[in-house]
Amino acid sequence: MSYQVLARKYRPRTFDELVGQEHVSRALMHALDQDRLHHAYLFTGTRGVGKTTIARILSRCLNCEQGVSARPCGVCPTCVEIGEGRFVDLIEVDAASRTKVEDTRELLDNVQYAPTRGRYKVYLIDEVHMLSAHSFNALLKTLEEPPPHVKFLLATTDPQKLPVTVLSRCLQFSLKALPAEQIAGHLQALLDKEMIRYEAPALLALGKAAQGSMRDALSLTDQAIAFGSEQLSSEAVNAMLGTVDRNHVLTLLVALAEQEPAGVLQALATVSEHCPGELALLDELISQLHQLAVCQAVPGSHDETITQLAAALSAEQVQLYYDVAVRGRRDLQDAPDSRAALEMLLLRMVLFTPKGVLPTRGEHAGAKKPEAATPSAQAGGKPDLRALLDRPAAAPAPPTPPTSQPAASPVVESVPQGGATSAALAQVERPGREEPSQQTAPEPVPSEPEPPQPEPEPTAEPVPEPTAEPVPEPTAEPVPEPVAERPTQSAAEEPPLAPLQEPTSESEVATWWAALLLRLDLDGTVRNIARNAVLVSREDTVWTLRISTGHEVLVNRERLDELSGALENYFQRRIQIQVDYERRAGDTPEAMAEARRQELLVDATRILHEDPVVQQLVSTFDGRLDEGSVTPKETVE
């Protein structure tokens, strides 16, 4: 007997043998068991996911001589003939080769006749989207009301091309692409039956290369068996598929973790000798960056190599590298030199780290700048990955004696005497930036806070007590002062305006409303609406505003609710806003502010005209004052 390919030899013959597509097989099995059968089914999905296979299984279930069941016997003549593709009442039509309306009419001429042997006459139309518009129109009436002995099974890879009238007459099932792990598991079971040796990574590589198609995976497996002489090794499968070895990508990731441009380019040159192309290398790099991100989010879910690399890179770096790689993939396809484009992409990852976002691998959390690459080693030279991985994630603290506490603020506790004291004080004083020229000196002991301010000279007294020197007083005092002053300044800026008093007359309401708006936390359009409104009345819980019709387009309920909320927060009671519209609103805060601006501008222009110097310049040079450039010193909000 001639050799039969795996895709045909192991084609599923029952729903139980079907791999994946549980949502489809479950619905069909329940419909068969409960005798709730539709007259037309549409199966959609990418190539090789089981559309035709499910249609044939359904046809076998409908015509099995043991009765309609979700599990046909598989041994009766009808089941055997359907499996061999020679059952007379299963009419398989390739719509791609029979697109004309005459072919469809010829097909439908026999619909009215009863099946020859089976229980149902089943029409299996594959690639149905290839039919012409006239063919669809000829099919519509029969598809909507076929004879009771007829079932239509349609399959397509492009359901968007089907008319809505056809879709509405069918039960549609969308078949999903299979995950690589599920494909690899099925391949493992088949190879065990075939008694062929394999490696698990090789099967996973075949599953990924199939891109969700089981038929493609089985075809690639046939090719790999022939390529590897009935042995599927990872090396042979990668060579056949032209994929990038994972170790090469890990070499590139190690160079990226070290953040040295020279090392990255050298690693790329080494890896490129073993890679089929730059695009394939970039795709595998994107895949490994995804694995790193998953490992950082879910520790312990990957092997030791990925875990070590995930510890060597921060989460922000992994996300940045992934984004740069995905965006650069488009540039790589458009670039005239793909190798140069890949080098530029990798250099972009290393050199152009956003300022203040990502920490470098050195002692402090700085940012890489394009001018030069800072070595990531702490003591010179390029570190290996093991040293990089062993480094703690947090930045190391400045060197302090064992008895001292870590400095959390510019005010320092007392430390022991000696050279370590000066080093620790220098590290602590650096962030303060108040007195860079001061000599480092021991800190004052808090138990003896003597402030001898008028004695700055006796710094060289040979007294062995480290707390007797008064010099640290000027150093310790200025450092906390700005820190203590900032919150008081910001606290003073929070309530700059005094609380408002209620207006005593109606003539004061306009100015009171303008002053109130300065005290409310309003921004953007809501503030613009309030400044162009006149407060007409103030009831206990209802305030009425008058707004000109020109600003009506800005007003909606959401913005009025925001204004009501600001007023409620200020007055600590419930306030509802109502709006009236008129052609002219009246003395709004914006109108009064504009009038005040014009008044200040007129005064400033008059003062300049009366200024003797300006008059002398105009007279001497026969000039004139450019009034359009005059700006008053006082500003009006």
Image: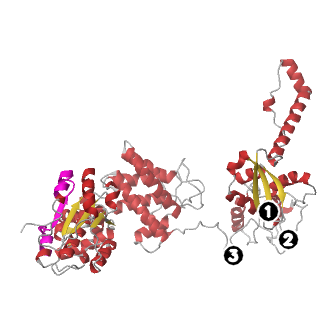
Name, please, the residue furthest toward the right: 504
Name, please, the residue furthest toward the left: 1
Residue 449 numbered mark, or none:
2
Q: Which residue is mark 3?
A: 403
Count of all numbered marks drawn on residues in the image: 3
Q: Nearer the viewer, mark 2 or mark 1?
A: 1
Marks 2 and 1 in Cβ contact (< 8 Å): no
Residue 542 numbered mark, or none:
1
The image shows residue 127, relative to residue 203, as above or below, that is above
Q: Marks 3/1: CA distance?
A: 66 Å
Sequence-first tag of 2 and 3: 3
Q: Marks 2/3: CA distance?
A: 21 Å
Give yes or no for residue 497 being in the magenta stretch.
no
Q: Marks 2/1: CA distance?
A: 61 Å
Which quadrant of the figure has residue 191?
Answer: bottom left
In front of the other: 520 or 156: 156
Element at label 1: strand
Left or right of residue 333, residue 596 in this image: right
**Which kind of residue does numbered mark 2 sit on?**
Pro
Residue 57 numbered mark, or none:
none
Q: Quadrant of the N terminus?
A: bottom left
Which quadrant of the figure has residue 620?
Answer: top right
Q: Where is residue 539 shown, x and y percent of the image?
A: 84, 62
Left or right of residue 90, residue 362 in this image: right
Q: Which residues are magenta?
A: 79-106
